[in-house]
């Protein structure tokens, strides 16, 4: 164990008989006991094996454990495939306002005008930030957004009467990219990055053929590098009628500086829990 990492005892080792984390109020006169309501066979008479600590002790114990890990609350999270950052607690509080968080999905539009207005304004703001013509908030998570974008690409070529079957993915791609392609019914073609971790327009031109529907690329890529030939790559794709799909997992690095739409992207998916303050886990683990 590193010298800088002190031993943290188990919470059971901190226990002392008689300590309490909370005091429950006495039962109101005339109120039934739990045993009377549930039946004595379903109620414990005592608890064995549970540590006895005060609430501050429990809080300090788990805070100390949390500081042994890499935390978004104290440091930048520089994973190339999904640049996350600290979400201010006040933003989580705003997201949890009852008018938003407790709104039933089947609420009639006439009773949900506040939420619908917020969503419409958010779509417009994201379109401006990304340089795209329109934005949909329908997908619930990043991988679902990938699948939605790829299904849009498939529908595009089906409408043109060109059932293209392949999507190019760089060897630096995040693992969800090929998985989403497979779910959308595409075959994956791999484009190899150069020694510096970039994809070159010449490599994309070599990989392109009439059966390629799109190139799916993250920019900055999963290695954390900005793709310097992205506009030339977009031109090469468009010359062959293919689309540029830009995975917006690393929009943190671009926002306010560059727009995916200006790079030639035709489809972009964003991860609002990474770049903004959407609570994590809305679409599943991660």
Image (spheres, rainbow, N blue to C red):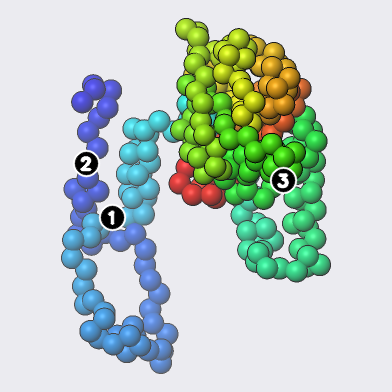
At 37% from the left and 63% from the top, the residue drawn is: 22
> Crowding at label 3, few (<14), some or many (≥20) Cα neighbours within 10 Å?
some
Q: Which disc is residue 136 wearing?
A: 3
**Mark closer to the chain start, 2 or 3:** 2
Residue 65, relative to residue 104: is it above or below?
Answer: above
Q: Secondary structure at mark 1?
A: loop
Q: Nearer the viewer, mark 2 or mark 3?
A: 3
Confirm whether residue 31 shows in the render: yes
Q: Secondary structure at mark 2?
A: loop
Q: Secondary structure at mark 3?
A: loop
For mark 2, what is the residue? 9
Q: Which disc is residue 53 wearing?
A: 1
In the image, 259 versus 229, the foreground residue is 229
At 69% from the left and 61% from the top, the residue drawn is: 99
In the image, 24 versus 78, the foreground residue is 78
**Mark closer to the chain start, 1 or 3:** 1
**Mark closer to the chain start, 2 or 1:** 2
Confirm whether residue 222 shows in the render: no
Q: Is residue 44 left or right of residue 87?
A: left
At 77% from the left and 56% from the top, the residue drawn is: 116
Alpha carbon distance from label 2 to label 1: 13 Å
Displayed quadrant of residue 45: bottom left
Position of residue 153 measured from the top left corner of the image (x, y, whole percent): 67, 38
């Amino acid at each position: 164990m590193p010298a800088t990492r002190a031993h943290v005892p188990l919470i059971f080792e901190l226990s002392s008989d008689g300590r309490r984390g909370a005091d429950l109020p006495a039962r109101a006169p005339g109120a039934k006991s739990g045993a009377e309501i549930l039946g004595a066979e379903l109620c414990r008479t005592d608890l064995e094996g549970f540590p006895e600590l005060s609430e501050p002790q429990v809080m300090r114990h788990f805070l100390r454990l949390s500081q042994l890990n890499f935390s978004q609350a104290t440091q930048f999270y520089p994973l190339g495939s999904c640049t996350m950052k600290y979400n201010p607690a006040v933003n989580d509080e705003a997201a949890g306002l009852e008018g938003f968080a407790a709104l039933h999905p089947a609420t009639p539009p006439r009773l949900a005008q506040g939420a619908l207005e917020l969503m419409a304004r958010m779509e417009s703001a994201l379109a401006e930030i990304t340089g795209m013509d329109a934005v949909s908030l329908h997908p619930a998570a990043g991988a679902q957004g990938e699948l939605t974008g790829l299904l849009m690409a498939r529908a595009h070529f089906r409408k043109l009467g060109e059932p293209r079957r392949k999507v190019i993915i760089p060897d630096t791609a995040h693992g969800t990219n090929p998985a989403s392609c497979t779910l959308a019914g595409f075959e994956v073609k791999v484009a190899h990055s150069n020694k510096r971790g970039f994809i070159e327009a010449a490599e994309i031109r070599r990989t392109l053929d009439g059966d390629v529907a799109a190139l799916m690329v993250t920019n900055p890529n999963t290695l954390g590098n900005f793709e310097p030939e992205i506009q030339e790559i977009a031109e090469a794709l468009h010359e062959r009628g293919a689309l540029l799909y830009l995975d917006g997992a690393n929009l943190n690095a671009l926002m306010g500086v560059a727009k995916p739409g200006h790079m030639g992207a035709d489809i972009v998916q964003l991860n609002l829990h990474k770049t903004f303050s959407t609570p994590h886990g809305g679409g599943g683990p991660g």
